[in-house]
Image: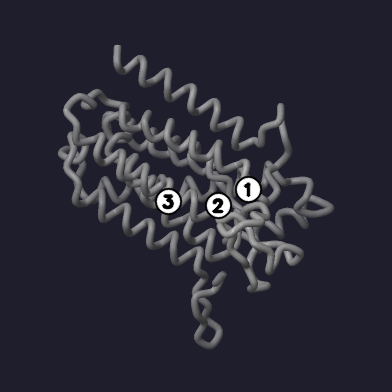
């Protein structure tokens, strides 16, 4: 597609980075305008700090998870692998690694500033889905996280040799799984906003649990259409599918406990 939106002289604006920044801005805008119990005790500085530290930890965690998953394939020795990770830093992330690291940073910030973790997480969960939707659009433009050959009218064709799609799959119709996931995240965002406005879901942790369950189902399903290296197979499932299944079960358990 368009891995570089435009370049002026030596400056290049990568599509992926631009969409990540757009998602970050959209999440901040949402958090600054929505009303909730957590929003009532969060000032703008704390909300911005939570987004910044969680996003920073998420980026580092997603990159670390990618390095651990594909470590043997990154180079012949440790030094070359580290160099590769540094040079390819704008690409190559594992979302669940980023989610875990970002959640850890979020949790410790809440504890340090004596904020209710579940209530605050409910406030931020829709923003995460919103930002993730923009991020997947960036994946589509960059050509990373590409799908399998579709062989039907739903396929998209990548032609730019600078994108992350292998050269052998250029000009081949592929499932636009990035678009599927982006649309799914935007739908999850809308559903969480609607859910957060219902009085019956006022129990802390319900919105967070709903997000985890919805995204886990979405990710588990779309993994069957992914065409990039999924990091091995365990019991017929990719690592992301195994994590999705575990996360979905944990979310169901949380929902049942909250309902009780």
Mark 2 nearby-residue class (10 Å; few <14, some 14–19, many ≥20):
many
Left or right, 153 with reference to 194:
right
In the image, farthest residue toward the right: 76
Residue at numbered disc 2: 177
Quarter where residue 156 is shown: bottom right
Q: Which is nearer the N-term, disc 2 or disc 3?
A: 2
Q: Which numbered tag is attached to residue 6?
A: none
Residue at numbered disc 1: 226
Mark 1 nearby-residue class (10 Å; few <14, some 14–19, many ≥20):
some
Q: Which is nearer the N-term, disc 3 or disc 1?
A: 3
Left or right, 151 with reference to 216:
right
Residue 48 coordinates in the image, percent (x, y): 29, 51
In the image, farthest residue toward the front: 153
Between the C-alphas of marks 2 and 1, the distance is 7 Å
Q: Which is nearer the N-term, disc 2 or disc 1?
A: 2
The residue depicted at 24 percent of the width and 39 percent of the height is 194
Residue 231 coordinates in the image, percent (x, y): 70, 42
Q: In this view, does 140 lie above or below 12?
A: above
Q: Can residue 91 be seen in this view?
A: no
Q: Could you tell me if the residues under marks 2 and 1 are in contact, i.e. CB atoms within 8 Å?
A: yes
Quarter of the image with the C terminus in it: top left
Residue at numbered disc 3: 183
Q: Nearer the viewer, residue 170 or 126?
A: 170
Between the C-alphas of marks 2 and 3, the distance is 10 Å
Which element carries disc 3, helix, strand or loop?
Answer: helix
Left or right, 172 with reference to 259:
right
Which element carries disc 1, helix, strand or loop?
Answer: loop
């Amino acid at each position: 597609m368009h891995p570089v939106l435009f370049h002026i002289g030596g400056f290049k604006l990568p599509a992926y980075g631009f969409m990540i920044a757009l998602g970050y801005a959209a999440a901040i805008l949402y958090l600054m305008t929505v009303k909730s119990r957590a929003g009532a005790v969060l000032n703008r500085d704390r909300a911005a700090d939570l987004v910044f530290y969680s996003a920073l930890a998420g980026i580092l965690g997603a990159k670390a998870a990618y390095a651990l998953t594909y470590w043997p394939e990154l180079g012949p020795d440790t030094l070359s692998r580290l160099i590769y990770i540094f040079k390819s830093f704008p690409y190559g992330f594992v979302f669940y690694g980023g989610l875990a690291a970002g959640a850890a940073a979020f949790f410790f910030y809440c504890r340090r500033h004596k904020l209710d973790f579940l209530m605050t997480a409910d406030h931020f969960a829709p923003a995460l889905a919103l930002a993730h939707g923009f991020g997947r659009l960036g994946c589509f433009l960059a050509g990373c996280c590409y799908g399998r050959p579709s062989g039907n009218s739903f396929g998209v064709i990548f032609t730019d040799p600078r994108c992350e799609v292998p050269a052998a799959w250029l000009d081949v119709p592929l499932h636009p799984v990035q678009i599927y996931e982006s649309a799914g995240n935007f739908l999850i965002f809308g559903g969480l906003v609607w859910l957060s406005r219902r009085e019956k879901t006022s129990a802390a942790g319900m919105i967070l649990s709903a997000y985890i369950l919805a995204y886990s189902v979405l990710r588990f399903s779309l993994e069957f259409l992914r065409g990039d290296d999924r990091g091995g197979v365990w019991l017929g499932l990719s690592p992301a599918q195994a994590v999705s299944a575990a996360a979905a079960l944990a979310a169901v358990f949380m929902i049942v406990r909250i309902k009780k």
